[in-house]
Image (tube, grey):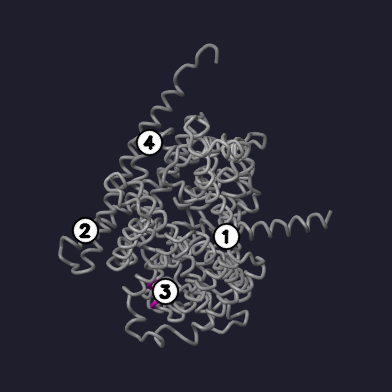
Amino acid sequence: MTEKKKGGFFKAVKEFAYGVAAHDSARFALKTRASMEHLFILITMGDMLGVPILPPYYSLRLLPYVVPQISTWKRRMLREKDLTDALA
Amino acid sequence: MNSVYVLILGFIVAFLGYRVYAKYIDTKVMKADPKRATPATMYMDGVEFMPTSKNILFGYQFKSIAGAAPIIGPIIAIQWGWLPALIWILAGTFFIGWVHDYSSAMIAMRNDGASFGGLSHKLISPRARIILLSFVYFYLLLIAGAFGNVVVSTAIGLKAAPMAWLLLTIGGILAGQMIYRWKKDIILTTVVTVVIALFGIYLGTIAPSNTIIGDELANSRPLWAVVAFVFCYFAAVLPIWRFALPINYVASYIVFLGLLFGIIGIFVLHPDFTLPAYTDFTIKIGPLWPIMFVTIACGAISGWHSIVSSSGTARQLESEMDARPVCGGVMFVEMMLAVFALIIAGTIYASPAEYGAAIAKGPGAVFAAGVSKFLGVLGMPTDIGRAYGSVMMIVLAITIMQLVIRFMRIATSELLSDVSPIFKNAHVGTIIASILGITVVLTGWWQYLWVLFGGANQLMASLALMLITAYLMSEGKPYAWAFYPMIFMFVTTIAALLYTSFTLMQKVFSGAVKGEALIGNTMMGVIGFFLVIAALTLGFEGLKAFKRYRKLRLQPKPASA
């Protein structure tokens, strides 16, 4: 029990230190990756809608990777944003 | 009074506020429900909406809200005496500060993670959103100006600071390269870069700026203002992993270690307050009410926190039960930081005259002297301790400044790109923000600038409290606990902004100021009046929304309800 508590305490301290020092970096890295994905989906989406941009062979090969992300991509693109979003 | 009693009093207020008042509001009024899905779990996209451990978010929230303001505010406000400042820090946090931070996150969570623009559109009116967003730009300019001033005065007042700042920057850039380019171990990276930063502090003491660039340049305000904004320019235009974030990463260790050992030093030394508990109602900056209530912003309540809580933290909380420890809890920690700063200012000088001479050089000098004294108890030499304190102050100020300039760049692009496509360019937006910031830093008297920044900050807080009240009314929940703090903050802040703007413009029209000061006074006076007009318009919109909600509540419910 004490050991568990001790582990819990050290885990909490470790997580706190991560939150102070590195969580923001991780979030920004993810945001950068997400903006790349947006661009990628934008390219492939045109093809899916019937406006060929990439050769269909590559589109079909990429399709399984793109489809699972469409719903979150759609939400991110359509969500109302304002200046304060850039701050945090 | 002994400083340890003040610290203990702070802990008692934090305990009661967090465990009794905040718990009551959380469970009985807001009815936080562990089973209710939060935006982080509902809309998880692995980017913005991402369920995150409350311990990580505690650190993230602390890092995001604890800049230089909770330290500088009390250091300036002690001019009215330490007792009024202490009462405002403790009572402000207990009745208003945590309410504001916690509720901002809660209302954002219960509105699908909407940001403040969206919330004001939904809860108040479409016009409220437009005013709020135009207000934000000037608010940010004042932050850049006030914090820029702190950096400049610290670099001039403490000649060891520039070298320490330079080495910290080098350490930070190296950290970015080691982590992201060379894929080095994080522990090795941390050790190497923190050691470089610490070595910079030592090097600063043996190679102060005046011995390298000469007295004239070392004391030049324009030089250090340009250096500070060039630093922010790189932070705004370079990839964030290359400059801003790794420097903040290394800096967080310097700040954290300094605060930890500083607090231990207070307990070991337990000095008595040497400055008077109360001086006068009206001092050089202005009257105690309303000016002191905006001078101490972040240590009691700050509008900045509402932006972090709503747009950042609310989208990552995995349970509603985490909002109280993360948002409310961190506000009480920040209150303790403000108490720490108050103890520093109130105990290290033998007389008010000695304090007066130190504060004339800027709050950075006072803070550095305090850190040096308390670290000295643990064996650190005075000059190194002073350099350590000065770099802490620069880091705390510039961390927020670089974020603000980056944000102003985005805002310039959003607001002006329709006028000309040139404003979409990152360099153009950053240069505009930097020039405006440098102008404010070089032309404004720093204490007025600080009051205006505090006023804008507190106004942001009262607008957040207005949104919270509107939400509570729309849900039919008890709202007095947010409504009365909002009224107090609204009236106090508008009074402070009017007083300061009027004083500034009076100096302009009476011909009391000339040259640079004329530009600074006019610019700050006009910004102050603009903020008041924006706030009054928003207040009017808020009033209409409150009436609408009251009317809805009084309407008889349909029979099926």
* Residue B304 image position (x, y, % from top left): 45, 52
Q: Answer left or right for B509 relative to A84.
A: left
Q: Is mark 3 on a helix, strand or loop?
A: helix
Say which residue label 3 marks.
Answer: B154
Tell whether position B85 is magenta.
no
Q: Do labels 1 and 2 share a chain?
A: yes
Q: Which residue is drawn at 21% across and 65% down?
A: B518
Q: How far apart are the alpha carbons under marks 3 and 2?
A: 28 Å
Do the residues indicated by labels 3 and 4 lie within the same chain of the protein? Answer: yes
Q: Which chain carries label 1?
A: B
Residue B179 pos. (x, y %): 60, 64
Q: Which residue is drawn at 15% across and 63% down?
A: B510
- Residue B158 visible in the current orientation: yes
Q: What element carries label 2?
A: helix
Query: Element type at marker 1?
Result: helix
> Callout 1, which amino acid?
Gly
Position of B407 with respect to B523 (left or right) is right
Q: Mark 3 lies on which chain?
A: B
Classed neighbour count for the residue bearing mark 2: other residues with Cα under 10 Å, few (<14), some (14–19), many (≥20): many
Dot 4: chain letter: B
Q: Mark 4 points at which residue?
A: B542
Q: What stretch is highlighted in magenta?
A: B152-156
Question: Horizontal and vertical percent for residue B384?
Answer: 53, 82
Which residue is tagged 2?
B505
Q: Do labels 4 and 1 share a chain?
A: yes
Q: Estimate the spatial distance between the alpha carbons at disc 1 and disc 3, rounded to whole Å.
A: 28 Å
Tell me which amino acid carries mark 3: Thr
